[in-house]
Amino acid sequence: MGSEVNTINLTILERDYRINCPAGAEQQLRNAAHLLDSKMSEIKAASTASGKVPGIDRIAVIAALNIAHQLLEIQTEQHEQEQLISEINQALEDALNESSQREL
């Protein structure tokens, strides 16, 4: 038994795409497409305002780089928070061990 795949229609930068996705993941894919469309529209608008009109492939690469950069920043921040939580947990364990040793 294979996984069910659905085809959905998405519009990104005024172009329509038919995309296959696993059943149940349609809304996540629509959300991702909306994010990509927003980023690409921002880049296109900024470029057009400065007098440059880049091709859609360049806009897509710049948008992908921006999104990848944001993802890496979030992952780095998450890793730092996980380390901080680990340090706090260790400090709590040390304090609890010290307290229980005093009671003995």
Image (cartoon, rainbow, N blue to C red):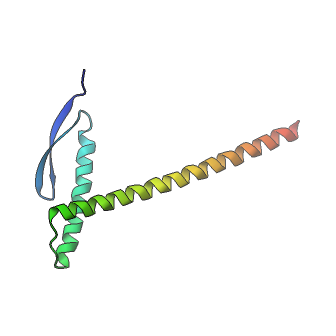
Q: Residue at x 28, y 58 (%)?
A: 64
Q: Position of residue 10 (x, y in %)?
A: 15, 48
Q: Quadrant of residue 89?
A: top right
Q: Residue at x 25, y 27 (%)?
A: 3
Q: Is residue 7 above or below residue 95?
A: above
| Quadrant into which the C terminus falls | top right
Q: Position of residue 73 (x, y in %)?
A: 43, 59
The extreme top residue here reads: 1
| Quadrant into which the N terminus falls | top left
Counting every numbered tag in the picture gives 0
The extreme bottom residue here reads: 51
Q: Position of residue 100 (x, y in %)?
A: 82, 38
Q: Residue at x 20, y 32 (%)?
A: 5
Q: Residue at x 60, y 49 (%)?
A: 85
Q: Is residue 38 above or below residue 94?
A: below
